[in-house]
Every structure is written in structure tokens, then in C-alpha cells.
Image (cartoon, rainbow, N blue to C red):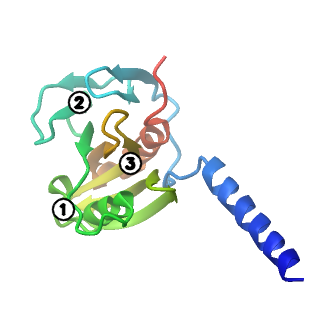
Amino acid sequence: MAIFLFIIVGLGLWIVRSTLLSDTSTVVSSEFPLDTTVHFKSVKNLANGLSFVIPETFSEKIEPIGQGDSSVYFSKQKDARLICFVEDSISQKDSTKNPLASYFDLVGTGQHSLVKNCKTTKTQVLYEKNGASFSGNFSLIGQIGDQQFVWRTLLSDVPVGGNPTFKNMMFVYPIAMKDYYQPIGVALAQKFGETAK
């Protein structure tokens, strides 16, 4: 009887785990529909290994944001910007803790330098531990003053050193224009990390 129960519970956990890992809806949803006139183009940054899309009307600008490997794109009106960057593993006192959970806490509580004192309004997180390594991603929508942002982070291990790194995108726009820009930010987050063609 105990063996039978163990098998049933184990099978149930495997089904839940498989469902979570195959679930691609780990990106927060938008309250508004995407404008059908917005078109995207793929970008592959060879310097930092990021693949993402940007609205076709956005252009890249050189703007230091305090992150070593970063790309910054602005809308034509300069009222919205997309920042894509890679950060090394954050310092952790407890090495057994999931680094993605620690990074999520840093961003979600407004302690990250790009979102100081932000108010998080919506989050979606997926992470797991396989042996000694962690994997996963998170996305969130938040506010800083009169600006709203969509953030997405993917946790990945550096192939050589095996240290975790965080691949990030942050899309910032005026709250007054959230009905237009929020669905664009969510679409960018959904496609962030996809292989550019």
C-alpha cells in the first residue's frame, strides 16, 4: 500500500513539474490589447548573447546605464525605452538559495539600481532546482513615479565557469500611455530570449 501511494504521489509531482516546465505563459499579461500597427524585428547581440525583438520604429542609442553589457532602444518620440542587459550573479550569503529567487527579491522590492523604490503591481515566477543548478525566469510590471515598466529575467549558467547570470529586459514608458505601451512591453517580454532569425 505504501509503495502504491509513493508511486501515485511521485507520478503526480512529475506531471505538475512537466506542466510547469512546458508552460510558456510565465510572462505577465497585459490589461490592454496590442495595437495591430506595431511590428517587431529580431535582434541578436553577439557581445552579450542576447536575442530579443524590438518595435521596428525603435532605434538604438548609446546610453550608459551602469550595466556592462547593455543595449538601449528608444521610441521615435523618446517617451519609451527598451533596455536589454546581462548581469553576473549577485552576492549571496546562502549559496543553497536559488539565485533567481534572490534576484527576484532584489528587483521586486525596488532594491535594484534600475528600479529603486519601485512599486510592483503584477508578477509571474517560474524556477526550479535540478541537482546543484537552478533554472527559471520571472517577469513583472511595476511603477516608478509617473513611469511604468515591464521587466523579464532569464537565469542561465555561464558554460565555462558555471556561474549563474541574469539576462534581463526592461521596457519603460509613461503610465499615462500604458494602454498603448503595456501590451508592447508584454510582447517584448514574451519574445525575450528567443533565437533571432
Percent position of residue 99, x then y: 34, 58
Tell me if mark 3 has few (under 14), some (14-19) or many (20+) residues whose alpha carbon lies within 10 angstroms of its own: many
Residue 152, label in figure: 3
Q: Mark 3 or 1 closer to N-term?
A: 1
Q: Mark 2 points at which residue?
A: 71
149 relative position to 28: left or right? left
Q: Mark 2 or 3 closer to N-term?
A: 2
Q: Mark 1 points at which residue?
A: 145
The residue lying at 37 percent from left, 22 percent from top is 43
Extreme-top residue of the structure: 197
**Callout 1, which amino acid?**
Gly
**Callout 3, which amino acid?**
Arg
On the question of residue 83 being in view, the answer is no
Tell me if mark 2 has few (under 14), some (14-19) or many (20+) residues whose alpha carbon lies within 10 angstroms of its own: many
Q: SS for tag 2? A: strand
Circle nearer the viewer, 3 or 1 = 3
Q: Distance between the residues labelled 3 and 1?
A: 20 Å
Residue 22, label in figure: none
